[in-house]
Image (tube, helix red, strand yellow):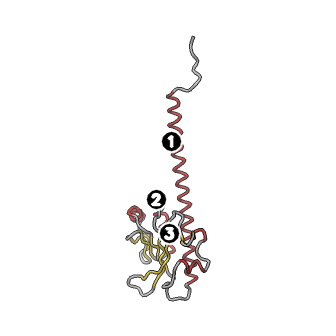
Amino acid sequence: KKRKNLGFSNMELMIYLAIASVAIVFLFNRVASARQSNQVVQESANVQTIITASQQAFAGQADYSTITWQVIKATGGFPTQMVVGANPVKVWNGLVTLSNQTVPGAVVTKAQLMYAGVPTAACPSFVSTIAPSVDSVYVGATQVKTAAAGLSAVAAIQAACLAGGTINIIFGN
């Protein structure tokens, strides 16, 4: 008597598991990419909100010498979702610092928004998104945007992001 094969062979199960694994990895990467893209959009909007509130709060003043995040928060201009306890945080966790920055060679003091710990993969798109509305952007020690020259090439931004460091956003009236 021949025995009927009612189940799957080991080979069929291995092929099925391999296909399922590839599909899961693909899906996970797509979800992670979409999540990161949403975080960049959200954080870029937060930066724009902070810049607009700062410009409004300091309109008519010579410079930003007294700016702090508490000053902007008191005006209602700091995004509420960024305030956790006594400190502002970003969607990638970690602190956000808002202070004044004396620009070398200039008499006026500008505002400086500092983002530490931005993920390397999110850094280039974050920098490219915020750059048009600010004077200067540094990634670590590398200046990737100047008011005069504009935004650096994509490859230069990616290299600066790979090297890591805090993103410093300089803006003024």
| C-alpha distance separating marks 2 and 3 | 19 Å
Residue plotted at (55% across, 78% down):
70
Where on the picture, by quarter, is residue 141?
bottom left
Q: Which residue is mark 1?
A: 22
In the picture, the quarter occupied by the N terminus is: top right
Closer to the N terminus: mark 1 or mark 3? 1
Q: Helix, strand or loop at disc 2?
A: loop
| C-alpha distance separating marks 1 and 3 | 37 Å
Q: Residue furthest front?
A: 85
Counting from the top left corner in percent of width and height, residue 51 is at 54, 76
- Report if the CB atoms under discs 1 and 2 are less than 8 Å apart: no
- Report if the CB atoms under discs 1 and 3 are less than 8 Å apart: no
Counting from the top left corner in percent of width and height, residue 74 is at 60, 80
Q: Amino acid at mark 3?
A: Leu
Q: Residue furthest top?
A: 1
Mark 3 neighbour density, 10 Å: few (under 14) some (14–19) many (20 or more)? some
> Against 118, is 170 above or below?
below
- 57 horizontally vs 149: left or right: right
Q: Amino acid at mark 1?
A: Val
Q: In the image, which disc is placed on residue 121?
A: 2
Counting from the top left corner in percent of width and height, residue 110 is at 47, 82
Residue plotted at (49% across, 66% down):
94
> Which of the two discs, 1 and 3, sits closer to the camera?
3
Q: In the image, which disc is placed on residue 61?
A: none
> Which of the two discs, 2 and 3, sits closer to the camera?
3
Q: Helix, strand or loop at disc 1?
A: helix
Q: Amino acid at mark 2?
A: Ala
Counting from the top left corner in percent of width and height, residue 137 is at 44, 72
Q: In the image, which disc is placed on residue 95?
A: 3
Q: Helix, strand or loop at disc 3?
A: loop
